[in-house]
Image: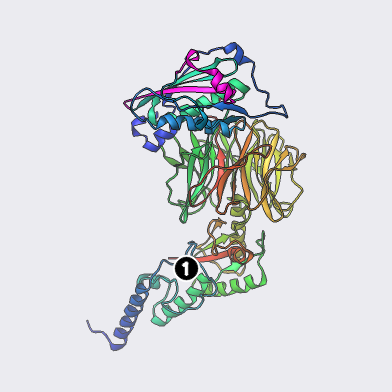
Amino acid sequence: MFCWRHCRPWLRLLLILPFLAVGMSRLAHAQAQRFELDLTNPNFQRIAIAIPDFKRQSSEQTQLAREMGETLAGDLDFSGIFRPLDPKGFLEDPQTMGLNAPEIKFPDWRRLGADYMVRGNYLVQGGTVKIEARLFDVAAGRPVIAKSYEGDVRGWRAMIHRFADEILYALTGERGVFDTKIAYVQSMGKNKEIFISDFDGSNPVQASRDNSLCLSPAWNPQMSQIAYVSYRDGNAKIYLLNLQDGSSRMLCGYPGMNISPAWRPGRPELAVTLTRDGNPDIFLVSASSGQILQKLVQGRSINVSPDWSPDGRSLAFVSDESGNPQVYAIDVGSGQKRRLTFSGTYNTSPSWSPKGDLIAYSGTVGGRHHIFIMKTDGSGNRQLTDGDGDDVSPTWSPDGRMIAFSSTRQGGSAIWVSSVNGIGVRRLTRQGGGQELPDWSPRMSGR
Amino acid sequence: MRLSCGSLCRILLILVLIGGMAACQKKPASSGGAMGGEGAAMGGGFGSGDMGGLNQAKYRELGLNTPEEIREFENRRAAFENQDIYYDYDSYVLTEPAKRILDEKISFLKRYARVRVTVEGHCDERGTTEYNLALGERRANSALQYIRNSGLSIQNLTSVSYGKERPAAMGHDEASWAKNRRAHFVLNF
């Protein structure tokens, strides 16, 4: 059983859920059932939303008033659905203006161009924080949702992310990704270690401490473990990092290389590449013991980078059996294999979309690596990224709306994100040393 | 205990040599990234370059007893460890120049059969991490197989792939990439 007191401080922050989400009251829930925004409308305009500083209810942690508002605005801006208004134009002092509908001057907010408006307040007392926040429909002058959160003050950011998620859900019927995380590889001198950041690249935390070369992080579906490759025992072996106590243990240490871990959805198994038989083949192994259950892909070619379909029945992977690396898919039950990419001579790192309908991968055009998206039968191929630098290692957000990848377009490797329609490309990580091999987590709340 | 003049001189010479090596001792050439100018730094001679001196017990284990034998070993060891073999893009096929270098390594291994060798496979920075790990292992294994095919029975011959993770040259052009598509040889003691 997990013991909080023995948990490393960084992990306590990471694990969070140190808060209780208390639905204050599901106001106007009848209205919330019909979702107010149609994202499929081609003339969709971003929704203007006003987020004044949160109101302080004590004299502790006064800076959070602004940080909470900015974090919420950043989340909603990131979604590509909202356009947060610049607080400089707001008329009232956020520390004196009221919190409830009758006290809010909706005509003023309407004149500023706001469609929606968030009013929040927080109370910090002895290391805990209580946050209350409401979303108002400005034109109707009525509240849409109201939520409160309570917990360790160091977890305030996760509470704000959760509220951003509630706003998105109330207005679109789709969950956001604001409580998700991205694991990636951070260069540290000669070594590389696994790091975890929030979905937007903020809050980077070092997760592995192997003082070695660590690669290929992969979240388990429960978001409690990360499988990764490390050279800490000499050769490339696969380890499991337990996010509850920070410990890590070897999962696969077969002779030769042990690389490319990929968790199978719905079953406690991973697909991995092992060279124990002399060739890089893909195996199914037990997630608890690392024991080999089945050889999935074999041959005389290089077979690496497996990625499961969401139903856990098919596997996309890279093989060079044609003479250069191409993306293939195999039906694990029947063993039927088909080649998916035919254009170009270097197509790698397939990533199956959460809805199961698309596969993102890294291909080459003009000598540069870029991210492509295709249907799972290889048709409908389209290029997502372009420009200078190499874009590799795509990973989908759990809502399927965004793809993170690593790119050298601004020099050193960093994690970037693009919406699936190719707009809103932005850089997520800005630390020195270089970041690569991102893996986007599932949703923490498992929704 | 009486020492003959000859054996005294021999011991003194060994001590001086070891001292000299300790003075300019760096980390032995290994998987580290700082292997700039490999191939150029060959045959630097005893006590030069990236050589760590071994203690006498180790030399004896390798069957090296006289200062002459040790000097010859250290000379050839520098060449063995500093000279890499190179590959074409996305290929693990041994080129003719690579085979000639491997022949020299085989000759070294025939002479010093008790050494332990790790063959490291490396790739250039282009492409993806995992495919390059597999390609690097193929490169290391192609060299390993060539050595084994010579009939040499070396027990302690292992391989490791670093993919594109440990480049020798840091540039982003073909000149650097060509230096990074390599197999590198490390002696373990």
Observer-nearest residue: B99 or B174?
B174
Q: Point out the residue furthest to the left here.
A: B1
- Position of B108 relative to A217 (above/below): below
Which color scheme does this rendered protein use?
rainbow
Q: Residue at x 63, y 48 (%)?
A: A391
Q: Point out the residue furthest to the bottom here.
A: B5
Q: Residue at x 53, y 12 (%)?
A: A27
Q: Residue at x 48, y 62 (%)?
A: B32
Observer-nearest residue: B26 or A184?
A184
- Position of B171 relative to A117 (above/below): below
Observer-nearest residue: B139 or A384?
A384
Q: Is residue A414 visible?
A: yes
Q: Which stretch did the figure color magenta?
A: A98-126
Label 1 SS: loop
Quarter occupied by residue B144: bottom right
10 Å neighbourhood of mark 1: few (<14), some, or many (≥20)? Answer: some
Return the x and y of residue A135 as percentages of the image width and height.
Answer: 53, 20
| Left or right of B42 in this view: B21 | left
| Left or right of A300 in this view: A186 | left
- Position of A323 relative to A225 (above/below): below
Q: Which residue position holds label 1?
A: B115
Return the x and y of residue A224 as percentages of the image width and height.
Answer: 48, 33
Q: Residue at x 59, y 66 (%)?
A: B179
Q: Is residue A8 visible?
A: no
Return the x and y of residue A258 as percentages of the image width and height.
Answer: 55, 48
Which amino acid lies under the numbered mark 1 shown in the image of this protein?
Answer: Val
